[in-house]
Amino acid sequence: MTMTDDPRTAAGAAPRRARAHTAAPRAHERLLRAADDLFYRQGVRAVGVEAVVERAGVNKMSLYRQFSSKDELVVAYLKRADARFFERFDASLAKHPGEPAKQLQQFFDDLTQRASASDYRGCPFVNVATEFPDASHPARACVADNKARLVARLSELAAQAGAADAPALANALALVIEGVYAASQTYGPGSAPLRSAASIAKQLIDAACAAGSTTGQ
């Protein structure tokens, strides 16, 4: 997918009032904020570059200077989402320093609360993956990277918590996380399946750590 919008007015089209040039750093931030909201709320394929420009309040040439294609804008949007995700992840862990089992549980408590917000639209990486079936698309590389990093962090915490099989626990917890994302959209905010996620995670964590304790004796 590439930008097909010509920055020049098409022949015969009604002229539009030109927007003033916006300084590059400010234009970049405005465009990313606009893409962030529009892509997350409406979907990447449903949103054209014209809508992003309108929301950002910059001229189209500013967009072309910052991003050579819509794909490049999508990748920038996902990198921004990735940074925010791990900021929230680390914020959950910071509530229980030095206690990995509680850190894992806290992440699920916080995720369930976040996924129960009325304006929550699920995981941006899951959303993008469903829109781009081609696994070679650059957006899919961002999705794979985010999910791989998450499993690695979960596995690290599981090992620190004393799980008998840290990778197995990490994979199980990762699957519960994906279930939270799906349930938030299908069953709705605050639904019973969504509320059960934290308790399921606790059972998995407790069982894995108890088995690790037994193995270590």
Image (cartoon, rainbow, N blue to C red):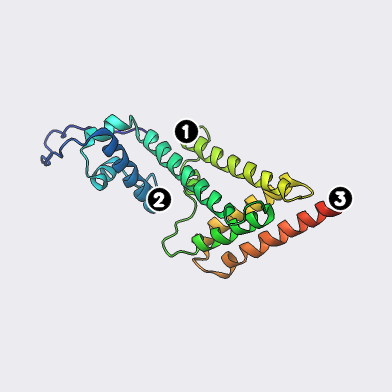
Q: What is the number of the mark on residue 65?
A: none
Quadrant holding the N terminus: top left
Which corner quadrant of the image does residue 74 belong to? Answer: top left
Q: Is residue 160 above or below residue 12?
A: below
Q: Residue at x 29, y 40 (%)?
A: 49
The Cα atoms of the two marked residues, 3 and 2, are separated by: 45 Å
Q: What is the number of the mark on residue 138?
A: 1
Q: Is residue 112 above or below residue 37?
A: below
Would residue 99 appear left or right of 129 to someone viewing this image? right
Looking at numbered disc 3 in the image, what kind of residue is underneath it? Thr
Looking at numbered disc 1 in the image, what kind of residue is underneath it? Pro
Q: Nearer the viewer, residue 127 or 87?
A: 87
Res 104 seen here? yes
Tag 2, which secondary structure? Answer: helix
Say which residue label 2 marks.
40
Residue 164: x percent and y percent? 79, 49
